[in-house]
Image (tube, rainbow, N blue to C red):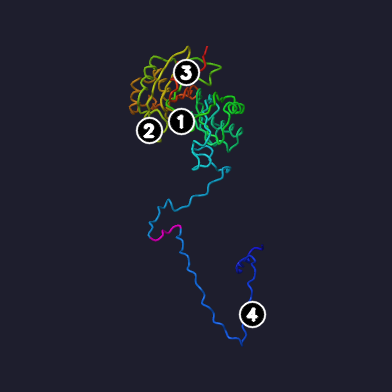
Amino acid sequence: MAPETPGAPTTEPAAATEPAAPTRPAPSASSPARPSAPRERRPKPPRAAAPHEPRAGQAPRPSSERHSRPPARPSGSPHAKTGGGHGFGAGRKTAGDWASYRLDLEYDGTRYSGWQEQQNARTVAGELRQALVTTLGASAVVELGGAGRTDAGVHALGQIAHLRLREKADPLTLQHALNDLLPSDINIVRLAVAANRFHARHDADMRSYVYQISSRRTAFAKRFVWWLRDELDPAAMRAVWSTFAGRHDFAAFTEQPEGQESTVVVVNGVELVTHGDMVLLRIAASHFLWKMVRRLVGTVVRVGTGEITADDVASLLAGSALPRDRKGQPRTPAAWTAPPSGLFLERVVYRGEPGLGQLRPVFDLR
């Protein structure tokens, strides 16, 4: 079709060809004209109400109901959800329609920017999703979520994840296939069928972290300890570490406390033991704040070196700021944050599971 000429009248396309109506001969002048019968007018159907106009006697609808629902995206659309809470066919299927699995994982977090998936960073969950997509296809994964969002460089002995798939898969076969594709520093220890609504984070009763401090230089475990040259006082550290048990406001020990929904955490238990050249610290709670464990460890180390006292820590817990040091620098837990290398997500405990066992080093220094 030729393009329209600007300014020229627009010609409508011809209608589809229909059979021509039979023509009647024109009446002659000599024949009398027949009176025409009055044309019957059919009543017009009532006009349907416009989408934004209420019918007579009908109250107007709320504005939220006036807009039509957008058409559902096809399941194969690249914009379909693959990591959210609803997944493919949102609004049509529930968690009971998917095949759910529990994954027990261990990983060395040195090379990763934490557990949580990020667009421009390499993460543990991102590596796991890539292996899942390679094995099952992009449309197969409905949801993938972890019990704890470990920070960059933090390790895990017992991270738990839930996985929802559109179709069932054999757990052992899937575990082996994923481990063959995952990097050597990420390993799925166990993959099993889970309850339809199992959620790794929401269903967890308790999480425990272990931190390892080494008093000697090590060639093999450097990535898994915080090596300190300073001499520590384990007894003083243990006394302060024990004060963190119970319900406290840990606003002084977290990053961006104003952005937290609440900075109050109930700590179920704490433990500090020495094992040869190592000091091991364990803390367990239902949840933790961002950087909370590493700042608690860093604060206790300052107690062990004699830089601050137990009273100073009590003041921080009470929300009071410490006076500046001799150089005028602020003394805050943020400046004492322990490095991620020594921190491990030890366990995620669910209802009915056994509690924590004896505290032992992850890697024994001999």
Q: In the image, is residue 290 part of the stretch drawn in magenta?
A: no
Residue denoted by label 4:
25
Residue denoted by label 3:
213
Q: Is residue 86 visible?
A: yes
Q: Are marks 4 and 3 in contact (CB under 8 Å)?
A: no
Label 1 sits on what residue type?
Answer: Arg
Tell me which numbered mark, 1 or 4, is placed earlier along the sequence.
Answer: 4
Question: CA–CA distance between discs 1 and 4?
Answer: 88 Å
Tell me which numbered mark, 4 or 3, is placed earlier along the sequence.
Answer: 4
Question: CA–CA distance between discs 1 and 2?
Answer: 17 Å
Q: Are marks 1 and 4 in contact (CB under 8 Å)?
A: no
**Badge 1 density bin: few <14, some 14–19, many ≥20, Cα 10 Å:** many
Tell me which numbered mark, 1 or 2, is placed earlier along the sequence.
Answer: 1
Instruction: Identify the image quadrant of residue 323.
Output: top left
Residue drawn at (49%, 69%), measured in percent from left and top? 42
Label 2 sits on what residue type?
Answer: Ser
